[in-house]
Amino acid sequence: MSDRPTVSTVAGQKGDGVDLRTYLERIMDERDQRYENRFKAQETQRQSEMAGAKELTKAAFDSAKEAITKSEAAQSAYNARSNEFRQALDDQNRIQLPRVEADARFKALDDKIEELKKGTLRTVISASAIALSVITLLVMYFKK
């Protein structure tokens, strides 16, 4: 047997034991293998999580594209209706008489009516004066 300590002599036991160095190397190899397996498992899990996240991201982008397409279609329909309404209002504005112009026309008509009233009054006064003159002449003629 060698002079090197064995696992059993370190543990205080008697008997044929494994060399301490060999024992520690085996433990380190086992642990290294466990860590390697754990690392591979984590790597596999990370890759599957990334694939899942990629699928979710793709689904979200597809949904966003579909929503944008629907939104654009709705906006186009709204714009078409809005343009039709705007055109109808423009047509209506072209046909209708503006308020300022209507007020000016009514004022002109009111002025003409006032002139006619004044003219009619003059005509009545003139006709009355002529009738009075004729009556006066007739009275004077028949009185003689």
Image: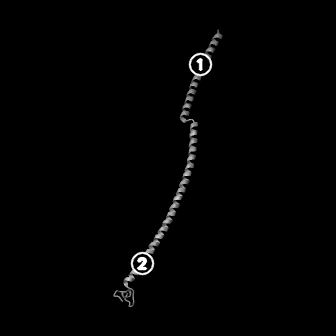
Q: Residue 102: which quarter of the image? A: top right
Amino acid type of the residue that numbered disc 1 sits on in the rendered structure: Ser
Judge from the rendering whether residue 4 lies leftward or rightward of residue 107; answer left or right: left
> Considering only vertical position in the picture, is 26 above or below 13?
above
- Specify the quadrant of the image occupied by residue 128: top right
Is the image coloured rainbow, by chain, by secondary structure, or in one colour? one colour
Q: Residue furthest right?
A: 142
Query: In the structure shown, which secondary structural element does the residue marked by tag 2 occupy?
Result: helix
How dense is the environment of label 2, judged by Cα within 10 Å: few (below 14), some, or many (20 and up)?
few
Query: Residue at coordinates 63% horizontally, 14% vertically from top-left?
Result: 134
Q: Quadrant of residue 119?
A: top right
Q: Which residue is mark 2?
A: 31
Q: Residue at x 57, y 42 (%)?
A: 87
Residue 79 image offset from top left, x and y in percent: 55, 47
CA neighbours of label 1 inside 10 A, class few (<14), some (14 to 19), many (20+): few
> What residue is rendered at 62% in x and 12% in y?
137
Question: Which quadrant, please, contains the N terminus?
Answer: bottom left
Question: Can you give x and y, in whole percent of width and height, for residue 34 in the image?
Answer: 44, 76
Instruction: Give the residue at x 39% y 80%.
Output: 25
Which residue was labeled with disc 1?
A: 126
In the rendering, at what x and y percent does residue 97 appear? 57, 35
